[in-house]
Image: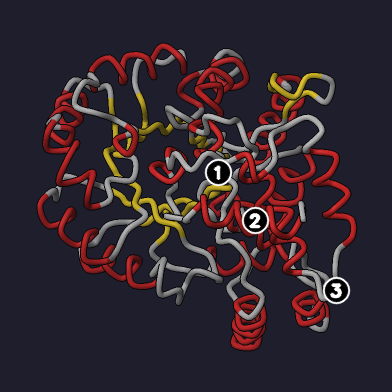
Amino acid sequence: MQKDLKRFGFGFMRLPYKKDNPSVIDFDEVNKMVDRYIESGGNYFDTGYSYLGGKSETSLRECVIKRYPRDRILIADKMPVYEMSKDDDPYEIFQTQLERCGVDYFDYYLVHDPENKYYEGICKDLDIFNILNEFKLEGKIRKLGMSLHDTPEVLDKILTEHPEIEFVQLQINYDDWNSIRVQARANYEICLKHEKPVFIMEPIQGGKLANVNENVMKVFNQYDERSPAQWALSFVFNLDNVDMILSGMHSLKDVEENTRFVKEFNKLNVEEMHIINKARDIMQNNTGIDCRYCNYCKEKCTQKIPISTYFQLYNQNKQSLKIDENTFKVYDNLVNEHPKASDCVKCGKCEEVCPQHIKIRKELEKIALLFEY
């Protein structure tokens, strides 16, 4: 339905790169993805200051802003408080974002993950919330929100102290719904308490819920031919207090499959919810590294280790019901061109920006033990 496509956003975090030059984003492919998404009825694009090392914002300018009338699209960006210091200038960062995106204002603007240490630290040190309210009064922000990877208690505190926040972006998917660490359901209920609409990120866990093991696939296929990604989207579209669901689509095929599914979506019945619950139980018995492949860590790694790629291989091996020899071959090929997991120097810079709070240094040791010895 058209209504549901207006709730389906295009996340500019996992864009395709050129096959012959993996450091350059493939604008031709992104243009096709954007065109198909807009033709289908979508119009919401989400970016971030540090996404793809800043290339996300400039890609949005080239592939969306320069190609479509500004009043046809909605743009969301974020103040990156999780990686700011007292020496940073929020005014300068905001102006840089406007220039990178090629816009005069943002339709939606978020305080990016003000988890408690950043909320009580940099947000107050630099007066972030008041500065963003100032931008809103000037018309440079239409709606002010926040994203968060923290506890319900922290979310409750921020929304109580800052009722001007108009929406909250949360990590929600069926696997994280009852997670003790993520607490997706509890955070969702805090938003209900404060009457704030929810925007959802990571509905497919950065692709993890699109690549499930054969036991989960068996559960899904016994009911119908929906793909694992479509089951994951079904869960979040079934929630009531949700105004936007973001998908970091990587290919034209992703766009076509997802938009087609959204158009045809119907509310889940009791049996379908039971199937999702059963899939969750199976997956949580095969837990690997809880990475969402956002690549924040990659930008900070002093050794340039492709951390999330190695995590993905490890998880693929873990999800398999037998030793996956292909993952060893892929790892061997990767280390011909990139540093190995064992090349980690334990500086910890990657862990400072990981929204999942993964103990990356320890996990790299596990990967080295599996693939290198």
Pick the residue in front: 215 or 131. Answer: 215
Disc 3 residue type (three-letter): Lys
Pick the residue in front: 129 or 68. Answer: 129
Question: Element at badge 2?
Answer: helix
**Counting other residues with Cα less than 10 Å from the Cα at mark 2, is it few (<14), some (14-19), or many (20 or more)?**
many
The x, y position of residue 41, in whole percent, is: 61, 40
Viewer-nearest of discs 3 and 1: 3
Q: CA distance from mark 1 to mark 2?
A: 24 Å
Residue position for label 3: 322
Q: Residue at x 68, y 45 (%)?
A: 309
Task: Name the side, left or right, on which 154 lies relative to 18.
Answer: left
Closer to the N terminus: mark 3 or mark 1?
Answer: 1
Query: Against 221, is 34 above or below?
Result: above
Discs 3, 2 touching: Cβ within 8 Å? no
The x, y position of residue 21, in whole percent, is: 78, 19
Disc 1 residue type (three-letter): Cys
Task: Name the side, left or right, on which 272 lies relative to 219.
Answer: left
Q: Residue at x 55, y 61 (%)?
A: 290
Closer to the N terminus: mark 1 or mark 2?
Answer: 2
Q: Residue at x 57, y 52 (%)?
A: 292
Question: Element at badge 3?
Answer: loop
Viewer-nearest of discs 1 and 2: 1
Quadrant (top left, top right, bottom left, bottom right) of the N terminus: bottom right
Disc 2 residue type (three-letter): Val
Viewer-nearest of discs 3 and 2: 3
Residue position for label 2: 262
Q: Which mark is residue 294?
A: 1
Query: Against 177, is 125 above or below?
Result: above
Pick the residue in front: 196 or 161. Answer: 161
Quadrant (top left, top right, bottom left, bottom right) of the C terminus: bottom right
